[in-house]
Amino acid sequence: MELLMIKMRRKTVLLSLIGIVIVLLILYLVNFDKVVGEIRKLSPDYFLLLLGIQLTSILLASIKWRLILRHSRVLMRNILPAVFVGYFVNGITPVGLAGGEPVRAYIISKTDNLPLPTAASSVIVDLFLEIIPMFLLSGLAIYLIFVKGIPLILAIFLGFIALVLLLLFIIAITLVINKEFSMKLIRILFNFISNIPLLNVYIQKHLHEIDEISERFNNAIRLHVMDNYIFFFGTLLSLSVWGLRFLRMYLIFIALGIPIEFSTVLIVETTVSVLSFMPLFPGALGIWEGASVTLYTLLGNISEASSAAATIINRFFLYLLPLIFGLFAAIYLGLSIQRLINSDKPEIQGNGNVI
């Protein structure tokens, strides 16, 4: 196990370096000085506005998770730092943008004495509530592609992704009604989570309890998904977060004095967000930047330097800022960053914090 964790750490570092090299290569190819010149056009007023939008998005995402856990006694003051730590883990692990979900489930289970199956099921339902908006947005983006006469290859890609999202939706529904399927998924999740440094020791310790955990997990999933209040308002909150994401990117272009259609922002951000779920580089480093610059240049008739500048500003708010907040949240919770990255299991202090 220790050898496996060493290999995983080396792989993560290597992939992070590759992602950074890709970003630097993009900046070099589009002229670094021009990109910096474009970024300097961002005024302090617009910076604060964009910061406010990002913080509002994070707050709404946290409220959505609290809504999902409305049948449990959890504190918002514990949910917020757990969400930030989830962002931090997402940014440092090559597991798409879902690597931090098991970690935040584990944290909230410790800080609020919540059964782990309940906490785990809540983050799965949280992801489930993201599927519906992404499915709808993919459909809208495909429609806009046809209307705007954009090359069909992009529509084909989004159509494929829409089918994948539909498959995930079917899996989620099956999970609710089929207990045997839940058992199989629990085993798959155990194998997946056992590769996450913070949780691998916990998984090994409770592997023999998989039947009981599966039963509790299935009951928790039913409780969350079958709640119409959670389903409706959770989906509404997800759509609001996506709307703020599009608005933030649109305002970045406006702040830089670059005219762009909102429909173009919707198409590009939907496509790039879907790409970012691919488990290639930590935080989708390189993939996000390369795809964004290419698509905005081609679809928006924008210079490469302007596209790169807008993308870098967006990534600051979407990736770097949550990463920094996540680091401070981990310190606030008493999490050892070394243990978070390495293979040790966290312990609980007397005040309930995770370390």
Image (cartoon, rainbow, N blue to C red):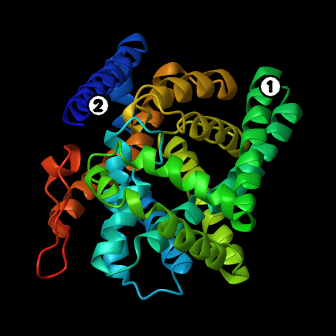
Estimate how packed mark 2 is, as few (under 14), some (14 to 19) or many (20 or more) residues with alpha carbons within 10 Å.
some
Q: Which numbered tag is attached to residue 321? A: none
Q: Which residue is located at x 29 percent, y 31 percent?
A: 8
Q: Is residue 329 above or below residue 267?
A: below
Can residue 340 be seen in this snapshot?
Answer: yes
> 312 and 131: which one is in front?
131
Q: Going by the picture, which residue comes out furthest to the front?
A: 208
Q: Which residue is located at x 16 percent, y 50 percent?
A: 339
Based on the displayed image, in which of its 4 quarters is residue 131 positioned? bottom right
Q: Are marks 1 and 2 in contact (CB under 8 Å)?
A: no
Q: Which residue is located at x 81 percent, y 33 percent?
A: 145
Q: Position of residue 318 (x, y in %)?
A: 42, 48
> Which amino acid lies under the numbered mark 1 shown in the image of this protein?
Ile
> 310 and 77: which one is in front?
77
Residue annotated with mark 1: 150
Q: Is residue 187 above or below residue 148?
A: below
State how many labels appear. Answer: 2
Report the side of 121 relative to 10 (left or right).
right
> Which amino acid lies under the numbered mark 2 shown in the image of this protein?
Met
Residue annotated with mark 2: 8
Q: Which residue is located at x 78 percent, y 40 percent?
A: 163
